[in-house]
Image (cartoon, helix red, strand yellow):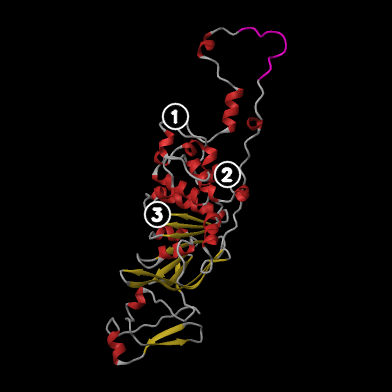
Amino acid sequence: MSSEAPEFKGWLTSPPEPEAFGDAPVFAEDPVFTARATAEPRRPQLLESLPELEPVPGPAPAQPALPDWARRPEPPLVDRRVEGAPVTCRGLVYIYRLEGYDVVALSGVDLDIAAGESVALVGPSGSGKSTLLSLLAGLISPSAGRLEVGGCDLAKAGEAELQRLRSRDVGVILQGAARNLLPYLSAEQNVHFAQGGVPRGERSRLPQARELLSLVGLSGRKARLRPTELTPGERQRLALAVGVANGAGLLLADEPTSQLDARSRDEMLRALDAVNRAGTTVVVVTHDAEVGARMGRTVTIRDGRVGAEGLRGEDFAVIGRDGSLHLPPEVLDVYAPGTLVRVELQPDGTVRLSPSGTTESAGAAKQGGRFGSVGTDS
């Protein structure tokens, strides 16, 4: 087995096997470092102890010529803007088969996410958040309804179109940083490998690996470290850089802070904010209320539908296209399921819910039969 590290140029289509590395450290080629080492050779230790000699008259000896690739300066960092991808869901339904039964995971989701927006999907376990994320990524197909990501109708797209979407337009961060990274590559090489799925003719639009690593706070020597040599927070931020390495207009992250402490979580949120400010649309699934509050908007998924949305720290109920309305838990404590209510539009634009006054309704109500009224902005 050779102790020399394999050349990095050929990894764009398939990663090398771990056994190929031996015990030798793996580094990407660095032309500037090589040029500096060639032009400024270090003197042997023996010469450093000798007295300085008088310079010899005459022209200085010619320095060996450097190859063209070594003379080229390293390209400067570029402030690249990403064109965010909008998302539109209309009556989105997803049904899967489990032990001989049909399970409805999503039952008519209506949702609009503008290009460049940051959204947190929140809600109890099993409500359909991760299923919605998989649909947005094109990993599974809708059972019914319409789903568009960046102008592509995923409900009608073929497999080839879905592959192009996943390779160029959508980035995904799976839960658990290790699932997104190749452990035997450095941080910089992980980013380079993630860019290999983009067609060669379009790679010129991609940001440099060191740009992305700098964006998430992994510049300098950390770019040369393998994932196992990074802290958990740094590994998660490396997964973020890998997720947007293809220049994706939509980033989907499943619980990106669930395994981090408070400090690492805040660093990850700052990195997500930096990616969002660069133009990328960010959609995050989370159970952490603090993470939801840091996003521009929260969408609560309940029973496979959009139950509420949060803006500027305030929650709002969402009226569906069919007129359905998810009542918040505190209202359900007053109006039990099955209660008959009148829905009355008031002159001031508020809506009043009042019981029908029947014995059945009174018996279904809680809190000693007292019914309140619910006023919401029209």
Residue lying at the far front of the rendered structure: 1
Q: Position of residue 69 (x, y in %)?
A: 64, 32
User: In the rendered image, is residue 218 in sight?
Assistant: no
Front residue of this view, candidates 186 and 102: 102
Front residue of this view, candidates 94 and 307: 94
Which amino acid type is marked by label 1?
Ser
Which amino acid type is marked by label 3?
Gln
Q: Is residue 26 left or right of residue 199?
A: left
Above or below residue 90? Residue 119 is above
Q: How many C-alpha atoms fall within 10 Å of the one at disc 3: few (<14), some, or many (≥20)?
A: some
The range drawn in magenta is 53-63
Residue lying at the far right of the rendered structure: 58
Q: Is residue 267 left or right of residue 203?
A: left
In the rendered structure, are the residues bearing label 2 and label 3 in contact, judged by CB atoms less than 8 Å apart? no
Mark 2 to mark 1 CA distance (whole Å)? 30 Å
Mark 1 to mark 3 CA distance (whole Å)? 36 Å
Which amino acid type is marked by label 2?
Gln
Residue at x 45%, y 64% (from the top left corner): 140
Q: Could you tell me which secondary element the residue under label 1 belongs to?
A: loop
Mark 2 to mark 3 CA distance (whole Å)? 25 Å
Looking at the image, tell me whether mark 2 or mark 3 is earlier in sequence order.
Answer: 3
- Identify the residue position indicated by label 3 in the image: 175
Q: Position of residue 175 (x, y in %)?
A: 40, 54
- Identify the residue position indicated by label 1 in the image: 2
Q: Position of residue 351 (x, y in %)?
A: 46, 83
Would residue 56 be counted in the magenta stretch? yes
Q: Could you tell me which secondary element the residue under label 3 belongs to?
A: loop
Looking at the image, tell me whether mark 2 or mark 1 is earlier in sequence order.
Answer: 1
- Identify the residue position indicated by label 2 in the image: 208
